Image (cartoon, rainbow, N blue to C red):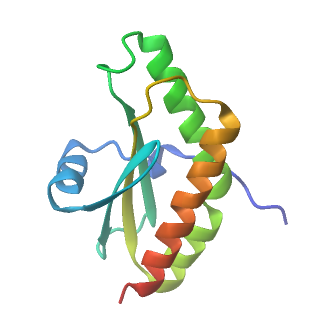
Amino acid sequence: MAKLFTLKKTERLKSRKQTEQLFREGKRFTLTPFRIYYLFNNDKNIVLQFGAGVSSKIFKKAVDRNRVKRLIREAYRLQKISLQEKLAEKNIQLNLFFIYTGNELPVYKEVFDKTGKVLEKLLLIAGEQK
């Protein structure tokens, strides 16, 4: 059976409480043009929750901010499977937030490649958990 590359509503980081906890207690690293915030938990049945953001100081127009977020979500959606499987295997939950810090509108290929590298790094970090 083919794997479904979906990004369901339950997989999106929407809770204000969880997002604030992620920024307050979570760890972060930078992989240009992204700053990644992540926090491992053991309490949820949803394995992986994801969010994306773009600064309105850098991109004044909402159209541009939405475009960048759309590119990030699409690249993440297509590459998240291995990380999801690793987290499910270890029975841990991960909240994840991408912030785009670049100064110009990105090309999809660049976003896809960098997202892949970020997810590889998170896969290594998840392997060290527990």
Judge by depth and name the residue closer to the eye, 71 or 90. Answer: 71
Residue 62 is situated, as x and y percent measured from the top left of the image, at 42, 13
Judge by depth and name the residue closer to the eye, 6 or 102. Answer: 102
Residue 12 is situated, as x and y percent measured from the top left of the image, at 43, 46
Judge by depth and name the residue closer to the eye, 94 or 4. Answer: 94
Question: Does 104 sit left or right of 1 as displayed?
Answer: left
Q: Is residue 6 visible from the viewing direction of this image?
A: no
How many numbered discs, if any?
0
Looking at the rendered image, the quarter that the C terminus falls into is bottom left
Q: Residue at x 29, y 71 (%)?
A: 41
Q: Is residue 79 visible from the viewing direction of this image?
A: yes
Q: Image quarter for residue 46?
A: bottom left
Residue 19 is situated, as x and y percent measured from the top left of the image, at 25, 48
Q: Residue at x 61, y 56 (%)?
A: 116
Judge by depth and name the residue closer to the eye, 23 or 55. Answer: 55
Residue 112 is situated, as x and y percent measured from the top left of the image, at 65, 45
Image vertical order of residue 64 relative to residue 25, above or below: above
Q: Residue at x 24, y 55 (%)?
A: 22
Image vertical order of residue 54 relative to residue 128, above or below: above
Image vertical order of residue 26 relative to residue 20, above or below: below
Q: Image quarter for residue 27?
A: bottom left
Q: Image quarter for residue 42?
A: bottom left
Question: Does 16 sit left or right of 123 as displayed?
Answer: left
Q: Residue at x 42, y 55 (%)?
A: 49
Question: Does 53 sit left or right of 80 as displayed?
Answer: left
Q: Residue furthest left?
A: 24
Q: Residue furthest bottom?
A: 130
